[in-house]
Image (cartoon, coloured by chain):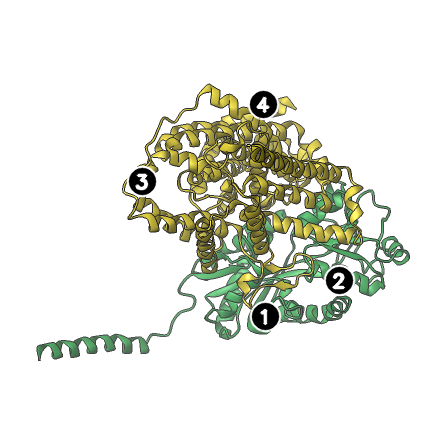
Amino acid sequence: MRKVALLMLAIMMVSSVTFAQGVQEEEVFPSKPIKLIVPWSAGGGTDAIARALAKNGEKHLGVPVVVENKPGGTGAVGLGETVKADPDGYTLAVIPVELSFLKESGIYPFDFSNFTKIMNLNTDPSALTVKSDAPWDTLEEFVEYARKNPGEIKIGHSGTGMLWHLAAATLALSTDTEYTYVPFNGAADAIASVLGGNIDAVTVSGAEVSSQVRAGEMKILAVFGERRMDIFPDIPTAREQGFDVVVNTFRGLGGPAGIPEDRVAILHEGFKKMLEEPDFVQVIENMGLGIDYRNTEDYNKLTENTAKTLAPVLESLLAVK
Amino acid sequence: MLGYLFDGFGFLFSSMAALALLAGVVLGIIIGVLPGLTATMGIALLIPLTYYVDPGIGLSLLIGLFAGGIYGGSVSAILLKTPGTPAAGATLLDGYPLAQSGHAGKAITIATISSAIGGLIGAIILSFLAPQIAKIAVKFGPPEYVLLGVYGLTMISYVSGGSLTRGLFAGCIGLLISTFGIDPITSVPRFTFGTLNLLTGFELLPILIGIFAMSQAIEGVRDVRTEVKAQVKLTKIGISLKEFVRILPHVVKSAFIGTFVGAIPGTGTDIAAFLSYGEAKRSSKHPEEFGKGSIEGVAAPEAGNNACVNGAMIPMFTLGIPGEAATAVILGGLMVLGLQPGPLLFTEKPEVIYTVFASTITSNLIMIVLGILGARFFAKVLSLPKSVIVAFIFIFSVLGAYSMRNSMFDVLVMAMAGLLGFAFSIIKYPIPPVLLGVILGPLVESNLGRTLLISDGNLTIFFKRPISIFFILIIVATIGQNLYKHYSKKQKNKTL
């Protein structure tokens, strides 16, 4: 009998704990550390941005922002983990531009519809760059040569279907020229191959070629941005040279779909302040990257526009296959 | 030039930089010894710390960590057959048997001396010939990488143990493993079985840990009851002058191989170590000792991988292009600090460059002192009961595989690789060729794809370039030498 009573008591105690959780107090957000997933390995550009940003997390959000690297599958592993996370605002990710189009090529099983967008952090234009002793000095001359010799110019990029490949393909599509695309394992290897004379040009970001250009080893024929780059104010854009080629990479901040709006607003507010911190600005400038804050709405437009403008380019590439 | 270098030393020893360098080497050795914590990761984690100090001090810390990390990996490889970093994958082939025969201290001493001398030679080449070597390194295009990879694969003949057929089979398994993930040229996913984790294929480190450490731990569990007295007796840690003279030529040769492999972008310390190992066995007077505890087999890969550390900095500083993974991280860190590595750094900030050069030279001297002091202490690990060691290897294997990229999937990969390694040891198939396949497969495949794109599908491109002709000649020579040996051995057996 005593055993039964004890058992009853135990059951009552356990259930009281269960019910106690049911009437939990309204929680203040954020009240625990925020995880910021970087879908690339430690040490890269995205990682540097995330870490420099997270440093001031405590100051502006009241809780630490912890960077966690989840590399693999050209970003798919880290983004996949973000999609699966609770949409409570405590799991965020730095989102690469590729999320706008990699579902089409079958590499990502998700796209922006699976994410809550918060804001855009940075934008960098692609730049058509050749060795400094190359026979072309303007985009016009380059395209002219390509018209006469279809497929002869070899353009290196950092992976088939990735943005820098699409940048080269955008040039081809809009000027009706043909190139041979050579994929490399990252921008640095592609740049080395231009320096060694194995390929003719790269369409990686202007920041990635900047040290070669400053040293006079390479020259940028055109910047594929809306405006000139801050670090190279003398180098004209493609548009200025009469070619409508605009391809930018951008890194945004987001989380799994379904984060409550009030929490998005709090995160937006906090991260915006972190973006304006002088030491963050300094780090980004040192790396030659461009800070490009855009609010949720503009970020939304940016991603949609990118998907739209790149759709015909993707189609042209898939048609060749 | 020399004056600048002295200024570099001056800065190093008149500031906190020397202390930072010492701290870096110590930290690096610890990180290297622990499997799963690689030099690359250690550097990535420490970079934020360097934001707040003088770039010269920050760089000294990172360089110490890089050198210490690559060296430290050899300690766990020798003692526990658990490579702390991929670079130590070749060291364990002879280091572990040597330790098991009671010469753990000696093996560590040899690894230390070879690492330091190899690193020093690399550092001196870096200090005096960096711009010249960089010019040759960029000439290395896709066709040359293909042939370098194929040459690396001929090393299978040196790490196959008794049977070349079994070695080739194992090599093919390794190549097969390397084909998982997105095709490097077309970006089409292969063998991903619908999981995102397989999109980039298998990571090297979990496979390495599984195939050597885990498989050995499984064997340990099997034998734990049968082996009554498995403890290893320790002999003295020193090496004789005769032994030093024997390893010295291999150390020097490996240092040159390592420096060059480091200097060409896209190849790293693991490839440097295996090429050095193969070349040492090829040119050794006692090739039969390799795989059973040859001191040359410990010296060569260690000299090669530490020289590679310095070689990898050649393209980083002269061209702004990283020589391998860890230098890619350092490069990112330098940019955060506002230093743009590349041709201009030499003219704009020579003091930084020469502090780096002074640091690379000094870090190797620190390593030799720490390594020899530590050898006796490290070797004590083996006097623990086998059952304790096995338990620790299990723990380290799981932790090591997980911590690489915070992934349980990698733990699973490690366990599967462990079973594969265990199966191989039962059916007596050699394991090192699997590793060569996994390491070199992607190098050969992606560059063959690039070569064919560049040449428009024409294979004669391989015969039109001087460096690639050189490689074709040494590949033919290596295969020829092996066939000749094989054939003459058969003849001898017949006449007996």
Q: Amino acid at mark 2?
A: Val
Q: Of tags 1 and 3, which is closer to the observer?
A: 3
- Determine the residue located farthest toward the right in the rendered image: A148
Chain letter of the residue beneath label 3 in the structure image: B
Estimate the x, y position of residue B76 in percent, counting from the top left: 42, 40
Q: Which residue is mark 2?
A: A246
Relative to B319, is A140 above or below? below
Chain B image colour: yellow
Badge 3 crowding class, 10 Å Cα cut-off, few under 14, some 14 to 19, many 20 or more, is some
Residue A72 seen from this side: yes
Chain A image colour: green
Residues at marks 3 and 2, CA–CA distance in whole angstroms: 68 Å
**Cβ atoms under marks 2 and 4 closer than 8 Å:** no
**Mark 4 or 3 closer to N-term?**
4
Chain letter of the residue beneath label 1 in the structure image: A
Chain letter of the residue beneath label 4 in the structure image: B
Please check whether the numbered discs 3 and 2 fall on a single chain: no
Q: Which residue is mark 3?
A: B230
Q: Which residue is mark 4?
A: B6
Q: How many marks?
A: 4
Badge 1 crowding class, 10 Å Cα cut-off, few under 14, some 14 to 19, many 20 or more, is some
Estimate the x, y position of residue A269 in percent, counting from the top left: 52, 65
**Cβ atoms under marks 1 and 4 closer than 8 Å:** no
Chain letter of the residue beneath label 2 in the structure image: A
Q: Which residue is mark 1?
A: A109
Estimate the x, y position of residue B185 in percent, counting from the top left: 69, 57
